[in-house]
Every structure is written in C-alpha cells, then in structure tokens.
Image (cartoon, grey):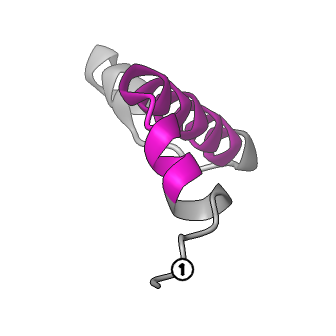
Amino acid sequence: MSGASILKAVKPKRIQAADIQTAAGWGMVAFTGAVWVVQPFDWIKKTFIDKPEEAQ
C-alpha cells in the first residue's frame, strides 16, 4: 500500500492558469533584474529618443 501512496504523491499534475501566471511573473522579474544590472539607458536614449544628426 505504501508504494501506491508514493506514486500518487509523485504523479505529475495538470498545469493550471495560476502556474502560467506565476511563471510569467517570475519571467518579468528576471527581465527587470537583468535590465537593472546592465542599465543600457544611454544606448536606449541614443537609439530611440535622440534624433540623429543630419549629414551636412
């Protein structure tokens, strides 16, 4: 009987919506942490915000 109870405890369960939401949340945390560590704000400013100088 104890073997059957162990198999019930180890048996994989279905993925639920809460699991997906949690994984997405941790992904956002990891992305935000990586951006915070690298801090590419000068590159973002030069690439997307500042207008390129016109060639004369």
Displayed quadrant of residue 34 = top left
Residue annotated with mark 1: 54
At horizontal 44% and vertical 47% (from top left) the residue drawn is 43
Q: Position of residue 16 (x, y in %)?
A: 67, 48
Identify the element where label 1 is drawn.
Answer: loop
Residue farthest top in this picture: 2
Q: Is residue 43 above or below residue 40?
A: below
38 and 25: which one is in front? Answer: 38
Residue farthest bottom in this picture: 56
Q: Is residue 1 left or right of residue 17?
A: left
Q: Is residue 43 left or right of residue 17?
A: left
Residue farthest front in this picture: 56
Q: Is residue 49 left or right of residue 5?
A: right
Displayed quadrant of residue 18 = top right
Q: Is residue 26 above or below residue 45?
A: above
| Segment colored magenta | 19-46
At horizontal 48% and vertical 39% (from top left) the residue drawn is 42
| Amino acid at the residue labelled 1 | Glu
Q: Is residue 47 left or right of residue 49?
A: left
The answer to if 28 sits in the magenta stretch is yes
